[in-house]
Amino acid sequence: MSVVGRGKDPVTRVYSALVEGLSDVLGIDQVQVFRLLQPPPRREYGDLSFPVMRFASKSGVDVESVVESVRGMLWERNLLRFADLRLESGFLNVYFKGEDVADEVFRLLASGWKPSPAQVEEPKVYVVEHTSANPIHPLHLGHARNASLGDSLARMLRARGHKVNVRFYINDMGRQVAVATLGFKILGVSPEDLARVMDVKPDYAVGWVYAVTHNSIDAVEARRKGDTRTLDDALSALARLKEKGPQDYFEKILSGVSTLRDPEGAVSELMKRYEEGLEPEKSLVRRVAKAALEGFKETLSRFGVSFDSWDWESDLSWSGMVARLLEEARKSPYFTLHKGAPALDLPRVIRELVEADTEVKTKIKIPRGFDIPPLILMRSDGTTLYTTRDIAYTLLKFREAGADIVVNVIGADQRLAQLQLKLSLLALGYRKEALNLVHYDYEIVRLPGRRMSSRRGEYVALDEVLEEAFQRSYREVKERNPSAREEWVRDTAWKVAVGAVRFALEQPGRLKPVTLDVEKMLNFRENSGPYLQYTYARANNILEKHGHIDFLKALPQALDEGLRRDLMVEALRFPVVSAKAADDLAPEDLASYLLRLADMFNKWYEKDPVIHEPEEPLRHAKAALVTLIRDTLGAGMNLLGVEPLPRM
RNA sequence: GGGCCCGUAGCUCAGCCAGGAUAGAGCGCCGGCCUCCUAAGCCGGUGGUCGGGGGUUCAAAUCCCCCCGGGCCCGCCA
């Protein structure tokens, strides 16, 4: 059995055999071999390369005999006809044989085979939670990065053969939702009605009311305390917000908040009553949150992102799940009182359950000299805290879906919180869950010079960026296809826009802080989603003009030279590359691979005509190669949410 | 104050976790290529003290230590 997984194509089969063979002979982990067996820096060293001497010298095995054993293994599986092995300066270099590989590929294509990620031999159940934006404002580009990454991860894991359950956590119990609700309560209007008056999507109406209410409260409180700086900030935010909505509604919120004796207290009271499930707060809050969610769903569906379940934070409380968790916590040996409040003694958890447990210690990294206070579970007034509810939610994710692994796609700013979550699970005896909870962290998207702020109402909405991208791609598509149907032009332009934005958010490494530059994001040239779509369309165009391909008439020798051979081998790496990208939760690796493949294809495209090739066996071979490239690009693009376009 | 992430070409980044074969792309800039499968393309040129300094190693962009710059996190907020 191999960690590479199953695939019918010769490259995947050779890869799989090499990983098993090297792992056996050298006595090292298959995963490690998989990581290191890669294309060498230069073509002349072959198609794949592995630093044998590094391990052979360590384990005292003779390098030559390692290569011989591996060669024997390939021979047993009848794979030596596809690849040569050579030992060169301490590296095991693999050279694929173009003609025999091509012959096999033609056979596969003739039988209807399509490129896809190598299939895992032991499928797991994954839960991927992503986006989970607070329902108080439209989705902005920060959420878009989260949604792009989360959705791509889900698609990749699913294609790899795992069972994947995708979830959105609705934080409706926070202060922010309560603030927005207070605003609507003062207005006495429903979010939907206000959206109609403002002629915007419901999430924009909620966002505006939230920001006006929040800053009104800030202004009132700051004035009372004599905090001039906060007051100035709030007033300037209000001045901007006044321009963005109906005057009378603006005034009504502002004066309504001003007449409250204790605005902060009103918000707290609203939160408390909501947690208890009391009317009318229960209906009011839900109505506001639902309006925002309605806007989210519209945006997400345009963005190509979908969810299997929407989990309300409040349901966790109302169903008694949070209360039961608190009961469990009280019985835990790590339960303690901190400043009089019920808490978990996390410093002790680190000493006793992390430091003393090798597996836990290697999987849950505690920073050196790390100082962490006990985690408070409940306020003195008896209401619960976010983290407590999050512990309950984590358990729900594991239980409800029967998950082996839960992946939380959450910003890097939540690292400490996610660590506390894992430590809390350990404290409550959920060791397996703690070890299989993955915080997929990524750096936030910043605006040039500052971070986005929904409180100040400063953010770049995803809808706006998509609209801008659409305008640009519409002009280009129209220009290139002057006689095309309007409906087709709009549809195509829209897919190009989504492809551009999604790819731009997925391609950079997730730990690089992304400073938002809409201009760059909408550059449709190389290194972009539209570049992939364009390349796909070019390949498809050749095939449409070529017509029927007789794969069995194709000449295998034709793909045994130069660019054609390299292109074929590179395309055949897709099953393995996409499999590894899924295992590593690394969409950016797949993105880089697709760009490289597209580059190679475009270079070949210039100099080697397909449909004008006079010799039929040669032409069919070239067309088969184009088929392989097109379908490989298409499969990869689908995994990243960049829709392949037959024409553009 | 403590901790974490980032720093590679004018700009945006890959390579770092798992040290090894002449540090790679793209954008930009300069110069070429559309009677021929879509020029969102191709070809050529330009461009690097891998933030700085020590150390480990036969070998360091990669590992360790110190420093500098930018960001983030340390609540009975979410």
Image (spheres, coloured by chain):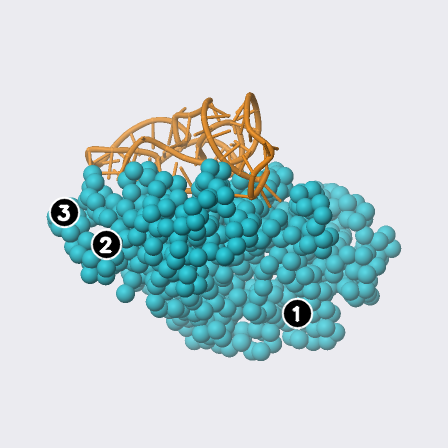
Chain colours: A cyan, B orange
Q: Which of A485 and A301 is in front in this view?
A: A485
Q: In this view, does A219 lie to the left or right of A16?
A: right
Q: Mark 2 points at which residue?
A: A80
Q: Nearer the viewer, residue B70 or A46?
A: A46
Comparing labels 1 and 2, the label whose residue is closer to the camera: 2
Give the alpha-carbon distance from disc 1 to disc 2, as whole Å.
70 Å
Q: Which of A166 and A494 is in front in this view?
A: A494
Q: Say what secondary structure mark 1 lies in.
A: helix
Label 1 crowd (10 A; few <14 / some 14-19 / many >=20): some
Q: Name the residue under label 3.
A: A64
Give the alpha-carbon distance from disc 3 to disc 2, as whole Å.
17 Å
Comparing labels 1 and 3, the label whose residue is closer to the camera: 3
Picture quadrant where residue B24 is located? top left
Q: How far across and how far down the image is residue A280, in percent?
A: 74, 74
Q: Nearer the viewer, residue A362 or A335?
A: A362
Q: How far across and how far down the image is residue A43, in percent?
A: 32, 39
Q: Residue at x 35, y 68 (%)?
A: A122
Q: Residue at x 79, y 60 (%)?
A: A195
Q: Name the residue under label 1.
A: A272
Give the alpha-carbon distance from disc 1 to disc 3, as whole Å.
72 Å
Residue A332 visible, this orientation: yes
Q: In this view, does A398 lie to the left or right of A232?
A: left
Comparing labels 3 and 2, the label whose residue is closer to the camera: 2
Quadrant assignment for the N terminus of chain A: bottom left
Label 3 crowd (10 A; few <14 / some 14-19 / many >=20): some
Q: Give the number of the disc on residue A564.
A: none
Are callouts 1 and 2 both on one chain? yes
Pointer 1 or 3: first along the chain: 3
